[in-house]
Image (cartoon, grey):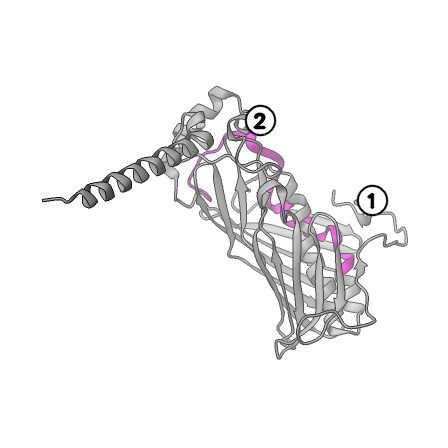
Amino acid sequence: MATPNDNQSKGFFAAMTSGLSMFGNAMHRSVNGLLGYEGVEVINPEGGKHDAEEEAQKGRWEQEERDGYWKMMQKYIGSDVTSMVTLPVIIFEPMTMLQKMAELMEYSYLLDLADECEDPYIRLVYTSSWAISVYYALQRTWKPFNPILGETYEMINHGGITFISEQVSHHPPMGAGHAENEHFTYDITSKLKTKFLGNSVDVYPVGRTRVTLKRDGVVLDLVPPPTKVNNLIFGRTWVDSPGEMIMTNLTTGDKVVLFFQPCGWFGAGRYEVDGYVYNAAEEPKILMTGKWNESMSYQPCDLEGEPLPDSELKEHAKNLTFEDDGDSVVSMHGCVHRCVC
């Protein structure tokens, strides 16, 4: 038989459970329920999640298109959708993944500078900044077309560089690329693994990227961070790449580890990149910081990762000049770079 205290306890916990349930349901309705679909999350990188209903109307789709596409895609939630899904042409940009692979050559002068650099740690500053430069293109949120098996793309005399790529597998899609000039060779196997989450997709790069600097024969291995594409169906599509980028000098054991900050509420931390260049004993030698859509800076540091006295944070890879050799030279965000056509 229950005592009065037991009844009071049950009443208290019942009320608390009911209150939490109502709060949870209200929160769910405020983000997803207003759209009329369960499990859909709409995120505005500049304003958090409180305006989900308004954000849902600002996407690239009309209401009827969103409804139809959402119903079609629900069955793929949790799956790898790299090659198993037929996608509407409206979400594509007029280029293929093979051409997209060539965009990393846009800031290839950083690899030239790395090859000419005597300091092994500054060399990693240049090469990792080169690897970061391609993320600026992620602000274009349209999907490149999948090439057909055996399709090739060639780019000749881009700043003295020859680049060629080929689609070597159709299911799963996989491309191979090679670039070379007098300073470096660049080899990439482009392969992705994805996880569809409803209104977003996680993209995990599982290919391999290697750079060889010709002067000293230094071989560099790149492991990029994962990428998350938000608001695929509802809302304005935007891309974030939270996680670690690691570039390792396979010849000496030195490496650079850079952390891409996840985008927080009201855009906090978006674009920010921080990390260190380490020697083979994993001791920090250089601090790196910046934004992947603007520029990177570096500063020598002690074994605790603190900047050395009398040193200053130096910005690099901005306002560089080139001898005009007939290539088109354009300026973007204060950086002078050669244009990929």
| Quarter of the rendering occupied by the C terminus | top right
Q: Quadrant of the N terminus?
A: top left
Element at badge 2?
loop
Residue at 71% in and 62% down: 288
Q: Could one spot residue 102 in this view of the protein? A: no
Q: Is 82 on the left or on the right of 252, as rendered?
A: left
Q: Position of residue 153 (x, y in %)?
A: 64, 46
* Nearest to the observer: residue 112 or residue 45: 45
Question: Could you tell me residue 73's position as x and y percent?
Answer: 41, 33
Identify the mark nearer the N-term, 2 or 1: 2
Q: Is residue 245 above or below residue 26?
A: below
Q: Which range of residues does the magenta coloring cover?
A: 82-110
Horizontal side of 19 relative to 138 (left or right) equals left
Q: Residue furthest bottom?
A: 281
Displayed quadrant of residue 86: top left
Compare residues 43 and 5 and report the one nearer the observer: 5
The residue where tag 2 is placed is 58
Place of residue 245 in the rendered image (x, y in percent of width and height, measured from the top left):
60, 60
Assess disc 2: are there few (<14), some (14-19) or many (≥20) residues with their C-alpha within 10 Å of its C-alpha.
some
The kind of secondary structure element at disc 1 is: strand
Check if residue 271 falls in the magenta segment.
no
Say which mark, if any, is on residue 234: none
Q: Tell me which amino acid carries mark 2.
A: Lys
Q: Is residue 124 left or right of residue 43?
A: right
Please provide percent x and percent y for residue 147: 55, 42
In the picture shown, does residue 154 fall above or below 237?
Answer: below
108 in the magenta segment: yes
Q: Nearer the viewer, residue 265 or 278?
A: 265
Residue pointed to by mark 1: 331
Farthest left residue? 1
